[in-house]
Image (spheres, rainbow, N blue to C red):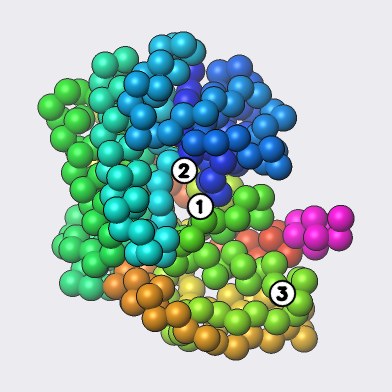
């Protein structure tokens, strides 16, 4: 029986992942944790929540022992744009937090899910159809921590036999909890603004193509990977995954099909633009498809239909 701890549970992915895992494995078998309580978050009413700062190894160990945890989904992280504003904190949370999590996992015999990111690639990486195994020289602090994290995960798996698995997530689009300071966040904001104001000012330039994924696919991918037959996994860690590839003008055009008077202009933020320019245009996710059956359900059209219908209802209230 799985007993799962989710760190960073109040974040964009964490909130929905906890609810999804509770549906699958039972409410009492999924412990949510974050560095502070957030009363407005839907998780607060839904099950066990513990305050754990991912960089606090002692507390992490205590909670893992208290609930007899055997699987950790380590989501606590500082994203790319915020990471450039506070590089020290980005390193501390993303690297020390991961290190302590892996140590606690090693000592308590837990398997671990660790998301990496398209940010683990850099300007020298082949831009189109970026291979699974390729050059990784990122130029953002967030990217540096993601590559170091991938290596640390590989090391702990090889040296100590810890069952660590992970995905390189692209931008994740969702409507429940807002993302906290990433470069791909525009693709979330645009839906809210389209419904509320019929106008959006995009902080990335036209033509900035990146990989994205709708939340239901992101949740399913994490579970599918953790449930996969280990004998079939050649990579285990840091799989390229993508749901769709688009640039700002593409998502704008798709939304406009539903909201004809929606307008978008551009006011480029040089920091986030530089980060986006250093990332791939599109990933090759064939290793994930072959090794554990990755098969996303949502493309841009299907996601847009769903986002607009859910958000229209939500924003009425
Ligand atoms: N969505 C993340 C970011 O923009 C990428 O992993 O920082």
Q: Residue furthest left?
A: 159
Label 3 residue near ligand 1, CB within 8 Å = no
Residues 235 and 82: in front is 82
* Mark seen at residue 221: 2
Pointers 3 and 1 in contact (C-beta within 8 Å): no
Q: Earlier in the sequence, mark 3 or mark 1?
A: 3
Which callout, 3 or 2, points to the residue nearer the camera?
A: 3
Q: Tell me if mark 3 has few (under 14), some (14-19) or many (20+) residues whose alpha carbon lies within 10 angstroms of its own.
A: many
Say left or right for 303 vs 271: right
User: In the image, what residue occupies the spot 46% across and 62% down?
Assistant: 182
Note whether residue 126 is visible.
Answer: no
Q: Indicate the quadrant containing the C terminus: top left, top right, bottom left or bottom right.
A: bottom right
Residue bearing the label numbered 1: 296
Q: Tell me if mark 2 has few (under 14), some (14-19) or many (20+) residues whose alpha carbon lies within 10 angstroms of its own.
A: many
Q: Earlier in the sequence, mark 2 or mark 1?
A: 2
| Magenta-drawn stretch contains 69 | no
Say left or right for 111 vs 243: left
Residue bearing the label numbered 3: 194
Which callout, 3 or 1, points to the residue nearer the camera?
A: 3
The local secondary structure at tag 2 comes to helix
Say left or right for 121 vs 260: left
Which callout, 2 or 1, points to the residue nearer the camera?
A: 2
Q: Tell me if mark 1 has few (under 14), some (14-19) or many (20+) residues whose alpha carbon lies within 10 angstroms of its own.
A: some
């Amino acid at each position: 029986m799985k007993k799962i701890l989710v760190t960073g549970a109040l974040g964009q992915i964490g909130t929905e992942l906890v609810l999804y895992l509770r549906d699958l494995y039972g409410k009492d078998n999924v412990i949510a944790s974050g560095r502070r309580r957030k009363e407005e978050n839907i998780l607060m009413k839904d099950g066990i929540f513990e305050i754990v700062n991912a960089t606090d190894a002692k507390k992490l160990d205590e909670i893992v022992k208290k609930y007899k945890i055997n699987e950790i989904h380590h989501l606590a992280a500082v994203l790319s744009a915020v990471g450039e504003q506070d590089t020290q904190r980005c390193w501390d949370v993303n690297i020390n937090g991961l290190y302590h999590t892996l140590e606690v996992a090693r000592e308590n015999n837990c398997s671990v899910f660790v998301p990496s990111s398209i940010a683990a690639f850099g300007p020298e990486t082949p831009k189109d159809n970026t291979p699974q195994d390729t050059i990784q020289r990122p130029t953002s602090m967030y990217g540096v921590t993601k590559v170091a994290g991938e290596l640390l995960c590989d090391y702990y798996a090889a040296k100590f036999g810890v069952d660590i698995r992970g995905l390189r997530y692209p931008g994740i689009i969702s409507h429940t909890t807002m993302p906290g300071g990433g470069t791909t966040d525009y693709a979330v904001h645009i839906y809210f603004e389209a419904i509320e104001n019929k106008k959006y000012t995009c902080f990335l330039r036209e033509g900035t193509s990146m990989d994205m994924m709708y939340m239901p696919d992101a949740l399913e991918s994490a579970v599918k990977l953790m449930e996969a037959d280990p004998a079939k996994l050649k990579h285990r860690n840091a799989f390229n995954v993508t749901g769709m590839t688009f640039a700002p003008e593409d998502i704008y055009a798709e939304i406009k099909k539903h909201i004809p008077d929606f307008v978008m202009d551009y006011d480029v933020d040089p920091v986030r633009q530089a980060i986006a320019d250093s990332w791939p245009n599109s990933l090759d996710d064939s290793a994930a498809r072959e090794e554990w059956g990755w098969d996303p359900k949502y493309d841009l059209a299907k996601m847009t239909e769903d986002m607009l219908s859910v958000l229209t209802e939500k924003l009425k209230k």
